[in-house]
Image: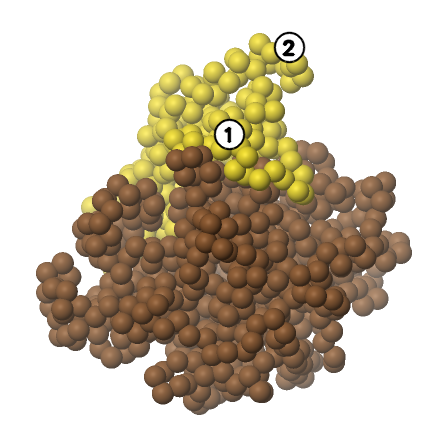
Chain colours: A brown, B yellow
Amino acid sequence: MILDAKIPEGPIEEKWDAWLDAHRMIGPGNRPGRRVIVVGTGLAGASASASLAALGYRVDAFCFQDSARRAHSIAAQGGINAAKDYASEGDSIRRLFVDTIKGGDFRAREANVWRLAQLSANIIDQAVAQGVPFNREYSGELATRSFGGVLVQRTFYARGQTGQQLLLGAYSALQAQVAAGRAHVHNRHEMLDVVIVDGRARGIIARNLVTGEIERHVADAVVLASGGYSNVFYLSTNAMGSNVTATWKAHKRGALFANPCFTQIHPTCIPQTGEYQSKLTLMSESLRNDGRVWVPRDPNETRDPNDIPEEDRYYFLEERYPSFGNLVPRDIASRAVKAVCDEGLGVGPVKRGVYLDFRDAIARQGREAIAARYGNLFDMYRRITAVDPYHEPMQIYPAPHYTMGGLWVDYELQTTIPGLFAIGEANFSDHGANRLGASAMMQCLADGYFIVPRTVTNYMATLDGSVSPDEPAFAQTEREVVERIERLMGIGGRTAPQVFHRQLGQIMLDKCGMSRNAEGLQEAMREIAAVREAFWSDLFIDGRADELNPSLEYAGRLADFLELAELMCLDALRREESCGGHFREEHQTEDGEALRDDEHFAKVTAWAHTEDGRPVPHDEPLVFNEVALATRSYK
Amino acid sequence: MRFTLEVWTQASRDEEGHFERYDVDGIDPDASFLEMLDELNARLAAEGKRTIAFDSDCREGICGMCSLTIDGQPHGPNQVTTCQTFMRDFEDGATIRVEPFRSGAFPVVRDLVTDRSALDRIVQAGGYVTTKTGPKPDPNAAPVPPAVQQKVMDAAACIGCGACVAACPNGAAMLFTGAKVTHFNLLPQGQPERASRARSLVLAMDAEGFGGCTNYGECARVCPQEIPLDVIGMLNREYRRGARREDDTVGTRT
């Protein structure tokens, strides 16, 4: 298959405007008759739903939580980037673009990233107009701070709860559309398949999680905003319910899945303490603005961290990367943390942790200044660990956090299935092999507020007529969904889903995590297949399918993770290079940095599902006209 | 650690519920309350028994999905969300009573899971700034003093968990609604709809069957986000302020 990204002609600065000028429109009178389904109500889904409904379309939004406001975007902490140059540093769209391309280790599509940078300022304006209370300077103007991988202060924030505030902005805009009767939120519903009629996405099959009822929903276009798949690792910073089901089902219906091996392991999370643990908690990257990362130089150090003098502390990020120091990008910081722990220098009960220390910042700026910036994060840390970070350094360790891979989309954010769009973390498009901090929310909201309302309109303008839920394709897809639920319920084994999930997570973390090699990946694929087989023969689900059944929901999602995991390994195996978060041990420089192979791998790998179970890779070559391919250096 | 749990069990909204007793041992003191329930569920599943349904998602105190009443206290003993409540906060060997959030406006869906969509409907009544997606003025054209921003943020930090309602002897949603009104009515962007907002939200609150405020203050005492009781004063002031305006199209309480 030839992957046509449909990138508009012309200079990069003008591509999006040119596209807008040429796109097909639908008149206001015809909009109420058009229906759009949006799956997921996080930043991408809520902003898309609100914007599409405000245009006049009928929108059906779906979320598995009890309210649209609870989607996991709510947990994003640190901030959102925008090229507004309020800090008067000479920042610009081009600089944000270059930082993002470079941060992604030259594995993202230039035209998309430019558009993202171009729209970044509009997002801030939109959010403020909705009443999002970003932090302010004494003058009353918007405040900004710095984030990893950049040398400017372009990150806007609302304390350490930026995601919460931006999501509530989008959520309240969506609620206004619900009140107006244009948007309908189906909470406690889960999409279990996409329905294809004559080659186009024309609806979904969803399960009402309260009654277990299987429902058919018809639309003219379907937008997936269902987030990422970090929970394939079992322990991650994602919410308990975050899952790959919507995108995976779409993949099995024909949508290509791009770069599944590109995952982000976030450096600053609270380390795991026991087997009982159900998730890992992120400590915002913004903490690296003022916190210094170190380990004792002596692997046998026993002193309390506050008693260790300066000369016995190894500030490894500052020493190895003098120009960016503690603010190197996430992939680099995570690998460095892992490396010092592998050398035996780690701290904590199992020596898998490093210190993040605010002693110097508190001494220099005072406790109050630090509390104003990070108060809620410090409180959260203390609540979880019972250690007070104002007096003792935090302990942190990397944890799976974000997935750059996702459904392949073209410039219009359309997947390879006509009428099926993917936005936010669910698509693959803007972050290449590593996402920079404060860029996820930017992408979600650029996609949801500004891009997909236009591109969905452009698509729907070409459609004639609508389909009925009585079409054979709906009945057939519904039957398959029901059969799968029956199959899960009928296994009648003895093992709860969590047990298999934990096994899967361990395999993925060990062999397809921060560091990968061919042998390990092949082993992982065999082990995943074994867990999958055990799952399908020994799964236990209590309760019934026609009632609220958390075990059944869990099992369904896990079944999809068990398939995705293998594709991640296959993709990691095929990509014979190191780039961003994908580190193949066979491909590294002498000092242990990632070694790209631009000649063979300056491309996107998009996988097609096949009936015989052997995924087929398709390539989209990446062309760099604006930024010269160069070795990423933060030294 | 070892605990005896008395857990509310109810098959569905229309069926009667009862307390079920469970003994759990070997619990790590650093496990969260929800992780303790995960462990109990895993053991129940291993014995082929019915597991306990409860809500949770982010497990870091921000999504507002978890909603247990523990020994009579919404969320538990520490004024933090259930997911941030740890077993080290309980006495070894204790008997702990676990119920859903209790309120007439939050019907039980199953076991410890409730339906809190009434809070969404309050927001739908006007808990927003009406604005479409599109070109907007530069934010610095309407400066917001940091003191105002901080006050707004204190209110906007609400996670919509509904603990305030569950704690209130009247089942009032005044802290939740007051937080919304405080957030929007203090900001320049919220001014055009200021007069109608408080009244629209109060009417929606009444329609959902929430009670009225008689200043118990229990809501603020259990709020995991420490939303200050002031927001209720603000709600009352804004309600009266709006009612005097001639351009009133919303009406008042009847």
Task: Specify whether residue A412 is in view.
Answer: yes
**Between A294 and A550, which is closer to the camera in this rendering?**
A294
- Where residue A261 appears, x then y in whole percent? 52, 75
Q: Tag 1: Cα neighbours inside 10 Å, few (<14), some, or many (≥20)? A: many
Looking at the image, can residue B87 be seen?
no
Q: Which mark is residue B187?
A: 1
Q: Is residue A32 above or below residue A509?
A: above
Q: Tell which tag, 1 or 2, sits nearer the viewer.
A: 1
Question: Along the line of sight, which residue is nearer the eye, B52 or A108?
Answer: A108
Q: Earlier in the sequence, mark 1 or mark 2?
A: 1
**Type of amino acid at the residue the image marks with label 1:** Leu
Q: SS class of the residue under badge 2?
A: loop
Considering only vertical position in the picture, is B212 above or below B118? above
Label 1: chain letter: B
In the rendered image, which residue does mark 2 sit on? B246
Q: Give the image location of residue B68, x and y in percent.
A: 40, 42
The single residue placed furthest to the right in the displayed view is A464
Q: Quadrant of the N terminus of chain A?
A: bottom right
Taking the image as shown, residue A303 lies to the left or right of residue A57, namely left
Report the residue at 28% width, 40% height from top: B78
Gap in Å between the C-alphas at discs 1 and 2?
22 Å
- Is disc 2 on the same chain as disc 1? yes
Quadrant position of residue A515: bottom left
> What SS does tag 1 mark?
loop
Q: Quadrant of residue A478?
A: bottom right
Q: Residues within 10 Å of mark 2 (few under 14, many from 20)?
A: few
- Residue A246, how many percent across, how many down? 62, 62
Q: Is A371 left or right of A108, judged from the image as shown?
A: left
| Amino acid under disc 2 | Glu
* Residue at position x 72%, y 36% in the image: A181
Q: Quadrant of the C terminus of chain A?
A: bottom left
